[in-house]
Image (cartoon, helix red, strand yellow):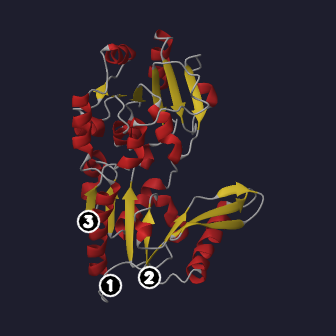
Amino acid sequence: MSRLTKTNRVFFVEEPEFDDGVYYDVVQQSENLWVVAPHMSRTMDEASVIAHQREFLLRLLTNMNIKNYATWYYTPMALFISDHLNPLVTVYDCMDELSAFKFAPHALKELEYQLLQKADVVFTGGRSLYEAKKNQHHNIYAFPSSIDFDHFFRARQLTTDPEDQETIPHPRFGFYGVIDERMDLRLLEEVAKARRDWHFILIGPVVKISESDLPRYENIHYLGKKDYSDLPTYLSGWDVAIMPFALNESTRYISPTKTPEYLAAGKPVISTPILDVVKQYSNVVHFADSAEEFIKVAENNIENSATWLKAVDEILSENSWDKTWEQMRKIIIEALKKTQSNNLKDLQEYV
């Protein structure tokens, strides 16, 4: 989306927050980027919540003078509030198999079917997800996670620890991301219990699971949510980056963005054998699916040698959000030419 703002206005509509009133925060965060945050009253029923948002989107189009635009969906659930709009082109950016996630809404599968019928273009966030969806749409493309290489490369030069990390002893094994049902908490607990001299740093919000589900040992450190801009600083102080994902339905199609980010930071990576990670990064990532394997791999002289770093940089050299967006943009414009008789060369507005 940040690449898109270089040439187009972007209105990023968030899911509603529920508090004491009904209002909308429309905050301009950069020259071409607005974040729209709906606030709904806790006392409202579901129909009223949807109706308010549908009406607001129409007012947003008028107030911001949005005439030619595309709709870009990250979740089919957004159809509830937007299927009355009349975009030039509709994009479904399918980043995960959301129906496999814990507490997935019952309507999700039906809404995804409707969105696949409505969409002019479908992108998937990984190869496995593409294979699962490729027969459901006529114009679908796989775009595995890309990277802001320069942003995370900074971790190779940084030497100052953040305050809440500086007192944690080494060796440090770090993870950042959402901590939810996709995490193999038992694996984390078993490794931490077996190697009390190793320290595990977890950065990110705890979502859809209880705080009581988290393993609690003196060598496991939960640092909470951090800003994207601060991640290289935390990464720089880790010895190994980890991706202890559970192997279940919710992780069957994931293609973790953090994989190339960890590698760009110059950190050895230990992951459970997530299919897309194995397919794309088997030459530079270490895999373990049990505590015993994890410990064996970690003790086997993992280091960011010059040869390993060269292999990492060769893999990542073809992986950037700039290249990904340029490829996406061409696909969208081709779809636009097919759906619009006035032969618009580019999209004027995005919602």
Residue drawn at x 25%, y 48% is 317
Horizontal side of 86 relative to 296 (left or right) equals right
Q: Quadrant of residue 221?
A: top right
Amino acid on which disc 3 is placed:
Asn
Up the image or down, 252 lies above or below 93; here it is: above
Whether tag 1 and tag 3 are in contact, CB under 8 A, the answer is no
Give how far across and how far down residue 339 sits, in percent: 31, 80
Q: Which residue is mark 3?
A: 139
Mark toward the start of the polypeptide (1 vs 3): 3
**Mark 2 → mark 3, Cα distance in angstroms:** 22 Å
Amino acid on which disc 1 is placed:
Leu
Up the image or down, 71 lies above or below 163; here it is: below
Q: Quadrant of residue 346?
A: bottom left
Residue drawn at x 46%, y 36% is 158
Up the image or down, 99 lies above or below 67; here it is: above
Q: Residue furthest right?
A: 20
SS of the residue at dot 2?
loop
Quadrant in which the N terminus appears? bottom left
**Mark 1 → mark 3, Cα distance in angstroms:** 20 Å
Front-most of residues 234 and 127: 234
**Mark 1 → mark 2, Cα distance in angstroms:** 10 Å
CA neighbours of label 2 inside 10 A, class few (<14), some (14 to 19), many (20+): some
Horizontal side of 166 relative to 238 (left or right) equals right
Give how far across and how far down residue 143 sits, in percent: 29, 54
Q: Which residue is mark 2?
A: 68
Q: Which residue is mark 1?
A: 344
Amino acid on which disc 2 is placed:
Asn
